[in-house]
Image: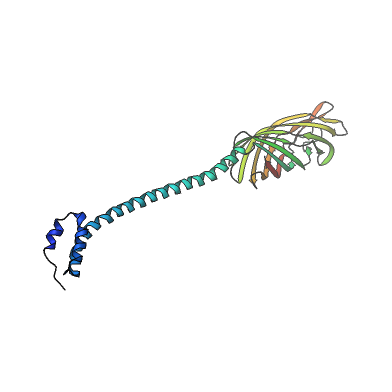
Amino acid sequence: MPAVDPAWWPERTSLPAAQIGLNRRQRLSSPGIGHASSSADDAPLISIKARLPIAAYLSLILTRQVKAVKKIITIAAAAAALTSSFAAPAACAQEAQSPWLVRVRAVNISPDNKSDPVGGVGASDRLSVSSKTIPEVDISYFFSPNWAAELILTYPQQHDVRLDGQKIGTFKHLPPTLLLQYHFTPEARFSPYLGAGINYTRISDVHVLNDGASLDSNSVGGALQAGLDIKIDRHWLINFDIKKVQIQSDVKLGGTRISTVKIDPWLFGVGVGYRF
């Protein structure tokens, strides 16, 4: 294989870099130059080409970083949009929920029957009132998620009056009750509450001792309440409720008070409710 002519090296190194490619082609086309000169002439080309990949590499890194930042921004925007999509309907639902709630219950009235002894009869002879189960409707208005007012309504209820176990007459009473309630966990499925208020009882249609005795027509007393709402869905719920109500009336015979009927019932209720 022919040897490389040393005379080429000064010419090659003294030329500007832009002319190296031309000199290389000229030398390769000259007679007497073989493959050995090719390996020597590649050195300047390698030096020049090495500068181009560095710039391209830096450009590639910058491009990838820009793409990564864009991807992070896109993911963050999507996450924010997804969060808003869940939060917005919940907020709208909370704002749109009506403050009105109606419940319908079956209520068992269980009187305490702590009446005074009937005067002139015997120390152990007391008046008692029968227990019974009645329908009840209550209307609640929520001033806030926790605080509500409840009005309890029913139609006049008839009770038997007994003396020492023997029925001596009947009467009717209408006991509307107004309560202020506090609901502890209004957004939860199980929502307990407590209430306190006032009861007004209207007594009518009194027929005791063959109409020889009478009862006071009005009774005003306190009322306490504890209950639990169990939500079925956004509107419907199941309700359990206990109330203690003060109801009493003086019994008069010939204008003279002979006893005080202390009904003071416990009211045990179960029913359903609808939140508008």
For this rendering, which residue is in front, 156 or 138? 138
Residue that protrudes farthest toward the bottom in the picture: 1
Position of 117 relative to 29 (above/below): above
Considering the image in quadrants, where does the C terminus appear? top right
Residue displayed at 24% across by 55% down = 51
Q: Left or right of 116: which side holds 186?
A: left
- In the rendering, at what x and y percent does residue 202 appear? 77, 31
Q: Residue 7: which quarter of the image? A: bottom left
Side (left or right) of 171 relative to 69? right
Between 38 and 204, the one lying in front of the other is 38
The percent position of residue 255, horizontal first and vertical second, equals: 83, 25
Quadrant assignment for the N terminus:
bottom left
Residue found at x 68% / y 38%: 244
Chosen colour scheme: rainbow
- The answer to which quarter of the image holds residue 254 is top right
Residue located 45% across and 48% down the image: 74
- The one nearer the camera, 210 or 177, is 177
Asked which quadrant contains residue 187, the reply is: top right
Q: How many marks?
A: 0
Residue 65 against residue 166 in the figure, above or below: below
37 versus 175 height, above or below: below
The image position of residue 53, as x and y in percent, is: 28, 56
Q: Residue furthest top?
A: 255
User: Residue 221: where, in percent of width, then height?
Assistant: 70, 31
Among all residues in the image, which is located at the extreme right? 210
* Left or right of 17 on screen, residue 192: right
Question: Which of 198 and 161 lies nearest the eye of the viewer?
Answer: 198
